[in-house]
């Protein structure tokens, strides 16, 4: 929880209001907010001492990624602190909208021993004239919706399915070394976690809207870097972050899903080219990134280098022709 003073109470109340036939605890990691989030968390923990275990994190523990502070230390520490048979996640500005969400997910996990996790679909909350309005979340291509009742990690490698934090419950398979070293070196903890869980079983899906994702307001977008980078540059960085996760996951699975990874990374590169500056330097930098920065041996990135050269050559050719005509 970080700087969620407007939303944290709604989030925690949506968890406290769960109707279950089992006992559960709520792990709250307060990440040294600069607003009143910490005070609100303390008050709620005092009001519900039998339910809430509050951990007050320190600024000095924050892990940096690409020069920005992240909540990764808090994220991992909360999961390591969990003592239950199952773990469910929810960010401080999101919330659940079904009082039997936990009960439904636990039942599915208990009834299906081959599953390591159960997730469901969601709604969006968007701000209109100062009021938050819930709307249906899109289910088209690119939004991570996969209607399969049961899926494997292959669907994640193919980018056909995304597990959203607020929708996820998984078995407590967390050991001392559950998180690999690379987990703090990539963006999007939930995407990375979903890859890790695939080592332990399959993913069940409840095709219901049981949680709400609060769409970013201007302050949150600024925190993510959108305002500073601009929309196109932000998207390029976003896509590069995905490439890094797929690369790390590919290594983690000893290249078992290399074919799927190559295909998805090709799509990421195609979108990067559409959004990056139309100049020679940008094209050269992209080739350098592919060959020198990705955490893979050269022969593993060669296919992507060939694809980039073949894809970009006609674009560069047209650019050169335009310059010649102008002269």
Image (cartoon, helix red, strand yellow):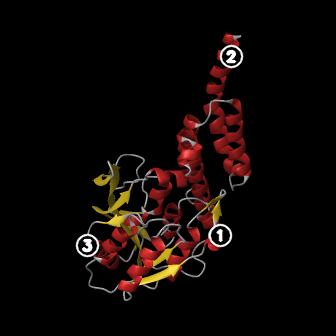
Mark 3 or mark 1: name the one nearer the start of the chain. 3
Viewer-side label of 3, 1: 3
User: Disc number at residue 237?
Assistant: none
Instruction: Name the residue located 72 percent from the left edge and 46 percent from the top edge.
Output: 291
**Spatial CA span between label 3 and label 1:** 36 Å
Dot 3, crowdedness within 10 Å: few (<14), some or many (≥20)? some
Please provide percent x and percent y for residue 283: 67, 35
> What numbered label is drawn on residue 323?
2
Horizontally, is 9 left or right of 221 in the view? left
Residue density around tag 2, few if under 14, some if 14–19, many if 20 or more, within 10 Å: few
| Residue 290 showing in the rendered view | yes
Name the quadrant containing residue 326.
top right
Q: Which residue is mark 1?
A: 181
Instruction: Please identify the quadrant where the C terminus is shown.
Output: top right
Residue 234 vertical placement versus 273 (above, below): below
Report the disc number at residue 99: 3
């Amino acid at each position: 929880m970080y700087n969620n003073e407007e939303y944290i109470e709604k989030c925690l109340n949506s968890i406290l209001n769960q109707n279950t036939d089992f006992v559960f605890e709520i792990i709250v990691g307060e990440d040294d907010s600069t607003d009143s989030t910490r005070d609100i968390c303390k008050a709620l923990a005092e009001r519900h001492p039998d339910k809430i275990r509050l951990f007050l994190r320190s600024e000095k523990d924050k892990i940096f990624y690409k020069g920005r502070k992240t909540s990764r230390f808090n994220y991992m520490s909360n999961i390591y602190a969990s003592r239950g048979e199952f773990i469910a996640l929810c960010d401080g500005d999101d919330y659940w909208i079904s009082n039997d969400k936990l009960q439904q997910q636990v039942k599915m996990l208990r009834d299906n021993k081959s599953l390591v996790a159960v997730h469901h679909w969601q709604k969006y909350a968007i701000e209109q004239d100062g009021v938050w309005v819930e709307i249906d979340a899109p289910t088209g291509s690119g939004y991570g919706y996969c209607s399969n009742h049961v899926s494997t990690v292959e669907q994640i490698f193919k980018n056909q399915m995304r597990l959203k934090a607020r929708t996820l419950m998984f078995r407590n398979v967390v050991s001392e070394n559950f998180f690999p070293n690379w987990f703090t070196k990539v963006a999007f903890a939930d995407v990375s976690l979903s890859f890790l869980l695939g080592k332990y079983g399959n993913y069940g899906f409840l095709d219901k809207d049981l949680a709400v994702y609060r769409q970013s307001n201007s302050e949150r977008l600024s925190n993510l870097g959108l305002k500073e980078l601009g929309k196109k540059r932000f998207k390029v960085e976003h896509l590069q972050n995905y490439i890094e996760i797929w690369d790390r996951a590919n290594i983690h699975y000893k290249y078992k899903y290399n074919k799927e990874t190559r295909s998805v990374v090709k799509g990421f590169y195609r979108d990067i080219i559409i959004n990056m500056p139309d100049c020679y330097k940008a094209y050269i930098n992209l080739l350098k990134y592919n060959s020198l920065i990705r955490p893979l041996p050269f022969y593993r990135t060669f296919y992507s280098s060939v694809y980039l050269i073949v894809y970009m050559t006609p674009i560069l050719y047209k650019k050169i022709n335009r310059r010649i005509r102008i002269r």
